[in-house]
Amino acid sequence: MTTLADLRKDYARGSLDETSVDADPIRQFDVWFKQALDARLPEPNTMTLATVDARGYPSARIVLIKGVDERGFVFFTNYESRKGLDLAANPHACLLFYWIELERQVRIEGTVVKTNAEDSDVYFHSRPLGSRIGAWASDQSRPIESRALLEAREKSFAERFGEHPPRPPHWGGYRLVPETIEFWQGRPSRLHDRILYTRQSAAETWRISRLSP
Ligand SMILES: Cc1cc2nc3c(=O)[nH]c(=O)nc-3n(C[C@H](O)[C@H](O)[C@H](O)COP(=O)(O)O)c2cc1C
C-alpha cells in the first residue's frame, strides 16, 4: 500500500517570471482566474479564508469569492459567525486559492472591511430564494439541537417573508484589502516559482520580488 510519505508529484505545467508578470497583482490575479475558468476547473471560485481570534488562535474555512477589483477581494457571510467574531476582534486575514490542475496557489494577506449596505443588499437579492431564507434560518456557527429544528426555522422564516425576505442585519459582505499577494507556480524538483507583490503604502504601487521555494 502507498504510504502518505510516498505520495508526491513533480510539477511542470508552467512558469512565472518577475519580468513578465503584470505590474499590478489584481490584473495578474484576473489573468490566472480567467485561466482557471477556461481550464474548467471544478469551482475555481472557492478560497480558504484564515482568521485569527482575540486569543491569537487561527482557524480556516472555505468561502466563495464574489468580486475582485483594485479595492480588494469580496466574500459574503454571517457577521455573527465564528469568522465574523474573529474579524470583529482582529481584521487581519488571509485568503488562499489552490488550483491543483494548474499547479498554482495564490495567497492574499491584508485587512478586511465590511462592504457597504448597498453592496450587501445587491448581492443578497441576487441569491436564490432558498439561500436568502437560509441566511435567516441559520445562526451560523452556533450549536443547534437538531436538523429538524433547523428545518422548522427555515419553514417559519419562509412563511414570514414569502418571496421577499429582506437582508438579515447580521449578514453581508467583507472586502479583504490586500497588503501582499503571492503567486506560486509549481516547478520540477520543488524549485517552484514564487512571485510576491507588496503594497507600497506611500504610492499606489506594488513592489515585486521573488521568494525562494
Ligand atoms: C465550497 C464551499 C463554499 C462555501 N462558501 C461559503 C461562503 O461563501 N460564505 C460562508 O459564510 N460560508 C461558506 N461555506 C461554509 C464555510 O466553509 C463555513 O462552514 C461556514 O462559513 C462557517 O464558518 P465559521 O464557523 O468559521 O464562521 C462554504 C463551504 C464550502 C465547502
Image (spheres, rainbow, N blue to C red):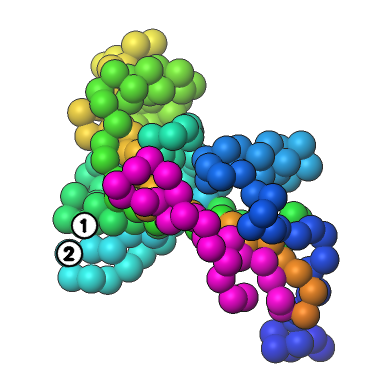
Q: For numbered disc 1, what is the local secondary structure? A: loop
Residue corresponding to mark 1: 90
Front residue of 15/111: it is 15
Nearest to viewer (mark 1 / mark 2): 1
Above or below, 37 against 49 in this view is above
- Disc on the earlier residue, 1 or 2: 2
Residue 82 position within the rendered picture, expressed as x and y whole percent measured from the top left: 27, 54
Residue 31 in the magenta stretch? The answer is: no
Residue 122 screen position, x and y as percent: 37, 18
Mark 1 C-beta closer than 8 Å to ligand 1 = no
Image position, residue 185 (x, y; %): 68, 62
Q: Amino acid at mark 2?
A: Ala
- Which numbered circle lies on residue 54? 2
- In the current view of this chain or complex, which residue is farthest to the top? 163
Q: Is residue 156 visible?
A: no
Cβ–Cβ below 8 Å for labels 1 and 2? yes
Magenta range is: 190-213
Identify the residue at image location x=69%, y=50%. 20
Query: Residue 184, image x and y in percent?
Result: 62, 62
